[in-house]
Amino acid sequence: MGQHLKEGEDYYLNEQGVLVFTASYHLKRGYCCQNGCRHCPYGFRKGAAKAPGGKEEKQ
C-alpha cells in the first residue's frame, strides 16, 4: 500500500490493545491473506473447508 495507516479508518485497538484491521483496510490492500481476519471482506474463515459444490463447511 505504501501509505500511512489511519486509526479508526484502517485499524483500531481492541479491548486487549491488539491492532485489528478494518474491512476498509483489507479492501484497500486488495487481496485476502487467509489468516482469518475478524473483518475479512473476502469471506475467508479459518477452519472452514470447501464442500463439494463450493460451499464452505465448518470443520
Image: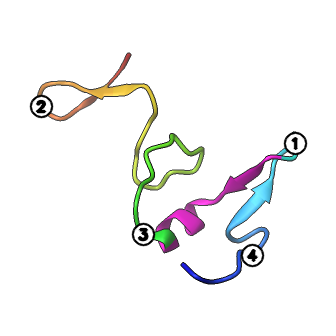
* Residue, disc 3: 30
Residue sitting at the far top: 59
* Left or right: residue 35 compared with residue 25: left
Q: Is residue 27 magenta?
A: yes
Badge 4, how many Cα within 10 Å: few under 14, some, many 20+?
few
Residue at 75% over, 75% down:
6
**Going 51% across and 40% down the picture, which residue do you hit?**
36
Residue range highlighted in magenta: 18-28
Type of amino acid under label 1: Glu
Amino acid bearing label 2:
Gly
Q: If you read the primary sequence from the N terminus, does the residue marked by circle 2 or circle 3 appear first?
A: 3
Q: Which disc is residue 6 wearing?
A: 4
| 51 in magenta | no
Q: Earlier in the sequence, mark 4 or mark 2?
A: 4
Q: CA distance from mark 4 to mark 2?
A: 40 Å
Name the spot of residue 45 as percent of width and height, x first: 44, 36
Mark 2 secondary-structure assignment: loop
Q: Which residue is mark 2?
A: 53
Which residue is rendered at x = 43% and y = 25% of the image?
A: 47
